Amino acid sequence: MATRGRSGFCRSLPELELLLLAILVLLNGTVLSLESASSSEIHTGEGNNTSKKPFPVIGIVYDEVSIPFEISLWVLLASLMKLGFHLIPRLSNVVPESCLLISVGLLVGGILKLARDEVPPVLSDRIFFLCLLPPIILDAGYFLPIRPFVENIGTILMFAVVGTLWNAFFVGGLIYGVCQLAQDTYSEINLGNIGILPCLLFGSIISAVDPVAVLAVFEEIHINELLHILVFGESLLNDAVTVVLYHLFEEFMESGSVSAVDAILGLVSFLIVALGGVLVGAFYGILAAFTSRFTSHTRVIEPLFVFLYSYMAYLSAEVFHLSGIMSLIACGAVMRPYVEANISHKSHTTIKYFLKMWSSVSETLIFIFLGVATVDGEHHWDWIFITATLILCLVARVIGVVGLTFVINNFRIVKLTTKDQFIIAYGGLRGAIAFSLGFLLHTDHKKIFLTAIITVIFFTVFVQGMTIKPLVELLAVKKKHEAKRSINEEIHTRFLDHLLTGIEDICGHYGHHHWKNKLNRFNKKYVKKILIAGDRCKEPQLIAFYHKLEMKHAIRMVESGGGSKLNSSFPSTVSMQNIQPKIQSPPSARPAERALPQLTKGREEEIRQILRTNLQRTRQRLQSYNRHTLVVDPDEEGLDDLILKKRRMMELDWKIKEMTNYLTVPHAQGSPTMSRTRMASGRNTDFIPPQQKKGNKQSADSQAYVKPGAKGVPSIQIDLASPQSPDSVRLLDEVGQDQGLTMSLPSSSSRAYKTGGKDDDRDQQKLLRCLSDPGPSADEDEDEPIPT
Amino acid sequence: SVSAAHLLRLHQRFQLLDKDSSGSLRSEDLEAALSENPIGVRIVGAFFQLGQEMVDFPSFVRILAHFRPTEKNRTGDGVQPDPGTQMKCPSSVAFQLYDRDRDGKISRTELLQVLREMLGLQVTEEQLQSIAERAIQEANLDRDDTICFDEFRKSLEKVNINHKLSVRFLE
């Protein structure tokens, strides 16, 4: 990635990349266009000469591989596009990815059309609904933040069901009215011919907020969790409504008449579709959880079960015309806690990355195909219809959101403000689902409907998508908190849960907490025993969380050059019993009295071994559902950068602290360790920006704080990085030494630092490689408790 | 304050809990209702603040009224109200539940007690110690090995505590 120091060189790089990409795109297009032409020729050519001919050393048999070849080319194109966009930071800040991808699709479509005068029907509904949509939805469902979702489920359902219904009828009804008013019997397509039912069908297609588009846009703007889950949850749950309305109106159009009974049947059908979908999903989810209980000997295919069961859930729901999306969400959400307790760390990583990868590629492909399909396809542009549709959609959305919020706020504790409402209304993007449903239509007016749908999609994605980010900034909407959960939060949240359950019990009120408590109890008592293998079912979540934190802490300390004392009660984790700190101080001792154990080489190896094996068992809970910036696992990627930066951070912090502490002696012993502990435990000290761990992009900020050492000022060099001897371990020996403080003139010490640093880097790399690549045997002992 | 209809319900509930119909509740009555709750004893202790043996209906309501959803909940900010009012903000109620000896700070022992209650027999003493240790390390800004109210509030900024501490029943 380009850093500031190398910007000159890198400025030419994006252009080069763009050039390469453009060439590849052209190649793509030409190959695609040539394929059908050439394949038939060669084929017939081969067939004619049955007489003796020389052995064909080289031949072209494209026909057999044409389909996979084309598919791969498309996927390759999509991925290269993605690469390209991220190389141009300026562009990707202004324009959301979805817009760029649609534009690319338009471009490719244009090329194909010029080359062949015909575009392959890539966005056929089968490909879309069976291949492209499921990964995205599964990704969303598996990593759905359950707590905020369930807390706001009432609001989400209101928006999804009532909001979509309102939108559908409003748009459908009024567009019919507009058509009647604007009918013109002499024009090519008489608007007045469009009956009420087709209009309602059209309304139902266009009214649904699209999860793909919402995800693509909202992920880049990082708004607060509440709004994100509201809009996103709505987009997921309105699938049931859309499915029902669509089939309903289609049936009515076939039969030609509507009666009251049909309306009631429609309502019943809605309940069946929604609940049935959820039940099917939950059923498959439980199956998956149960299966994962027995996979301890075949770890390699664990991810496969997750994917297969989820896909089966989707397909089964589709078979019965139930809501496939809801089924997929239910399956992912239900199976996740149990599966994660059962599978190995590597499988977990595999699942995470595969899901992210597939959903990313799917999303890219969807947008590109949307562009391509726009170029193809017969359009009929009717100004009145289209503008009316656009305006009606916007108006309907605004009225719907405002009206519903007015009602909902009476039932909510945290009310939705006007700002929130605006964002919710503005975030109602339409996307490819609407387009595919439109594609499936069989009416006479398909052309005009499709054109209108595409226009609305383009408008929402381009205009709303591009402007929502500046608007969020302008309105100063609350953004997402990036910091990690601390153990305090965890403890206090549980405490409060118990407290509120208690209060509710006292009041005799069977509220929210009461049922949650009952569910948790049921879960613990019965379900976990069935679905989770071994002892893990008994481990309380708090302990697991704590283990995870301690593990991360340990890793960070060992990596970043010697950190602070080991926590004296470190041996609390089972396998950590091996490390006995030489001086075990009672918990009430002052921090200064705790001393670091003196570690020999043997101990060092032990520590490495233990950390290696324990790394397998910790999970990084995904903090945010964000495909674009996956949270950096400390044991996975980018450690080198991270360590260097952390080291610099700590040094700087130290320098400042020591400057002040130098004059006031007393806590000199305690403060460096405390500050180091604090830093290592990830607290928000002044110098560590909260986003430091969030991938490489934002770590550029941390560079700003690194100041070159002042010349001539006798500086206190705290050499975290250079231990007493280059080949001993990073843990500093504090007993009898002053934390490696050396008061010296700048020149000599900086030299010392540099040489120490080089050795350190090498050792660091070695340690890293040890940590990040545990041997295969480490897989055998997987029976430590895993967090649920 | 609490509306009339709710008062009626609370009164009915009070009478239900009051097994010996004495017009006031003893701690055993409340504890019976909270038998399954890990921190039940603590909650009951909050009702009997001044070492009383019994709690009558007005004080019952007054204590429960702390958990009303109020307008302040909109901002989600645990602002401490001025000492003139009797109403405490929800986070201070929670703090007091931790801090049973009322010295204004949560010491390590108090935290250990809470953890022990919540986690019960499922964990070893050592693990409890380390968790308490770590919690104090994280929250502790003034290096005095205890958690004072401000630190408590700070560590809960992300948790929308007022939202959490509202029982809609008591509106």
Image: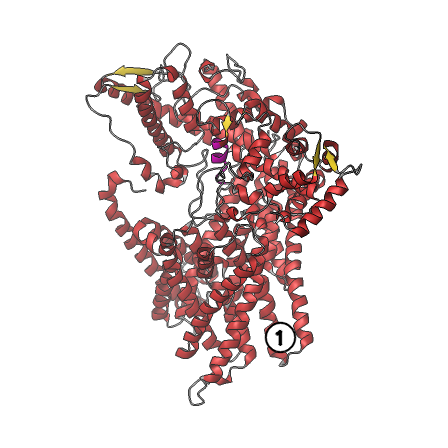
How far from the left and from the top, in percent, is residue A639? 40, 33
Q: Is residue B154 magenta?
A: yes
Which residue is at the far front? B84
Residue marked by disc 1: A251
Q: Nearer the viewer, residue A497 or A208?
A: A497
Q: Nearer the viewer, residue A192 or B82?
A: B82
When the figure is inspected, residue B150 is found, relative to residue A230, above or below; the finding is: above
How far from the left and from the top, in percent, is residue A418? 45, 57
Chain letter of disc 1 in the image = A
Q: Could you tell me which residue is drawn at 62 percent across and 55 percent down?
A: A313
Magenta residues span B150-158
When the figure is inspected, residue A47 is found, relative to residue A68, above or below; the finding is: below
Residue A31 visible in the picture: no
Which residue is at the far right? B20
Residue B9 visible in the picture: yes
Magenta stretch prevailing secondary structure = helix
Q: Nearer the viewer, residue B80 or A192?
A: B80
